[in-house]
Image: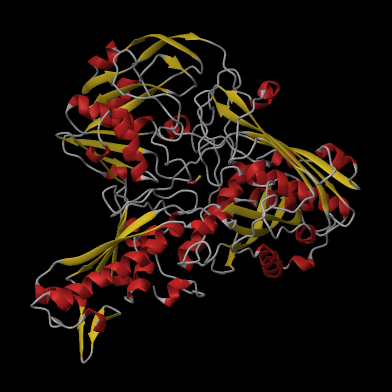
Amino acid sequence: MQSAAQGAARTVSVNRVDGRLKVTGGARYAADHLAERAAHGYLVLSTVALGTIRSMDVAAAERAPGVLAVFTPFRKLELIGGGNPFSVGHSWLPLQDAEVRYHGQAIGLVVAETFEQARDAAALVSADYNVRPPAASLPDGIPRAADPGRINGEPSVLDMLADGVGTIDEALASSEVTVSGTYRQPIKHHSAMEPHATVAVWQDDQLTLHNGTQSTSLTVGTIAAALGIEATQVRVISPHVGGGFGNKIATWAHPLLAAAAARTLGRPVKVVLTREQTFTITGNRSAVQQTVTLGARRDGTLVALKHQAYSSQSTSGGIFESAPHTTSRYLYRAANVHLDQKIVTLDVPPPTWMRAPGQESGSFALETALDELAVKLGMDPVALRLRNYATVYPGRNVPWSSKHLDECYRVGAQRFGWDRRDPAPRSDVRGEWLVGTGMATAVYPGERFPASVKVRFLADGDVAVSSATADLGTGMWTVLAVLGSEALGLPVARIRTDLGDSTLAANIGAFGSGATASTGPAVGVAAEAARTELINLAVTHERSPLHGVPAADVQYDRGELVAPGRRIGFAALLQAVDVAGVEATGSAAPGPEHGQHAFTSFGAHFCEVRVNRWTGEPRLARITTVIDGGAIINAKTARSQIIGGVIFGIGQALLEGAQVEPATGRIANANLAEYLLPVNADVPPIDVHFLDHPDTLFNPLGARGIGEVGTVGVAAAIGNAIHHATGRRVRDLPITLDKLLD
Ligand code: MOS
């Protein structure tokens, strides 16, 4: 591998190679795929939260113009096996039984010649239910909270106590200063710009699925299992994904039903979810209620950290938000730690992974509680965090591979101008605006998976670099091009990338902020193998100008093969021997070093808010975010990732929340008019800075993940700034103006 790929400091910053396609409409998303003779499917959703369907009246729908079929639990599309929250997103398969588990569950699929015909006919379907009252409120369910079992391999109730300390409450009782707060946040939705869509096309017994997904390979496995076919019979294509945030990992009902309906009807079927349907068909982030109690000495040293959480879970199963175990477990050094995660099972749509699952909610509670402690101690919030800085992973005697969180604090404080801060709340009033500043820590684990990449030298002088990974706006198209360019010593413009197709080199996809760290190292391996193949061809092919030269005497140098006295570009070579391309596939995977270190991305956020004295309106003025994410492969798309993460956090802090009606279990604001997301006017200038310390113990590139860490801590930093501005501590998200009115 070239030196630049070995973890040296980097300054690469290039435009998205797919940018032109995206802004010209040339990038085809799943729903853009026009299959010949495609029929259109429209989901029918339940209008009650809990019960059993006694019967469904589909006669009017079947008679409606253009309708080809109406599938229901009484006229099934046969799916086999069972559900699974990790594959289909819930514990059951759609339309296989008459049970209704939440409001907005799929109970039918109408297929018609056009989308509008299917939609209109779906409105004619009615269902008769035996209804039972749902449980849809997290607070109401807390008395019956349950133990979820192990979390990240550890008990859901975890004590890490100092010698001689019997319980966390004992440690709290002996602390000189304590603070305690209860923090709440509602169910939230990923709200990717591209609603979920699928086009299923059968040719004989081969299925091609155009399906926006973070993992073509997981989709292949899920679809094949449910349809009772071999994985080799399924191809999933997903070159462009308009946002995922964890919500396009599971396969959900629509691709399963589209594939099954297309098989039954003998023609392609396209199903595009409406915005409203995405709220209930494709998962959410748990509502979470947490209590954090901190005990400290007067100098700020943490003696006790007690973090308890209740997260909403669905009767359909799902990946609930595990807050304490993803934050308080390891973020600080505290003499005594107690974590307790419980779940409250509700009749609501299943939770699933959502950007920084666990850390997002956990950091809000922990990082707000630390601010409350700093205020009580009269200590600077940065100094308090440095006082409790962890240098080894708590309770596990392993060091971090690379941790520069202290530098994030220092550099962030300096860039932001933190020193100028008067710590007294409500000390900065400018006209009608109360001005405040706050900060918080960001943290997300470094994840890495096995991955393969194919590198192919082409006779036209380009090199193809491809892998079955995904780009959900994350920049992977460009990262592959940059890494290919570096590994081969060629301009980025000569690298042709391809991804998002399950038939490409094996790759589990994009999640856990692990795509670059997983796929990146395989680019170098594949490039080296392809160079070897190229040299072999050059010395063995009789029409090659290098025929007969010992392979050991031939070097690859920036697209050319160099032998004593001779030099030939790979395109000229391939043309001379009349070969279209030379290729090799390379793989990379985590090794045994992964048991010897902890791998974590860190960061620090600093923000300034203004709260209107008369209306309570909170406005962000500016944010500085410093990230320790290892080597940065492409500064431009990396910065974009962090900005996106910070904006996600602004939504958490100020705007987002599902309004679940307690009596009906209906999400009353399942649309983007009432489920508020940050728009440009809500987003202040965001100063993103990367430390760029390559983590070469993690992988040869030194790159950790940056897709999720940028979100973590943002809500706390904003809430802390609001407290500084107003003197009011809001522990219930989102922090809306009604909570700030005097
Ligand atoms: Mo992420 S929540 O693993 O897409």
Question: For the N terminus, which image quadrant?
Answer: bottom left
Question: For the C terminus, which image quadrant?
Answer: top right
Nearer-the-camera pick, 142 or 163? 163
Residue 634's place in the image compared with 49, above or below, is below
Q: Tell me which corner region of the image, top left, top right, bottom left or bottom right, holds residue 365.
A: top right
- Please indicate whether residue 127 sits to the left or right of residue 163 in the image: left
Give coordinates of residue 108: x percent, y percent.
35, 20
Give coordinates of residue 488: x percent, y percent.
32, 73
Indicate how the structure is coloured in the image.
Answer: secondary structure
Nearer-the-camera pick, 319 or 212? 319
Residue sitting at x 47%, y 57%: 591
Nearer-the-camera pick, 401 or 553? 553
Residue sitting at x 84%, y 55%: 300
- Please indicate whether residue 38 sits to the left or right of residue 142 in the image: left
- Please indicate whether residue 350 sits to the left or right of residue 164 in the image: left
Q: Confirm whether residue 612 shows in the render.
A: no
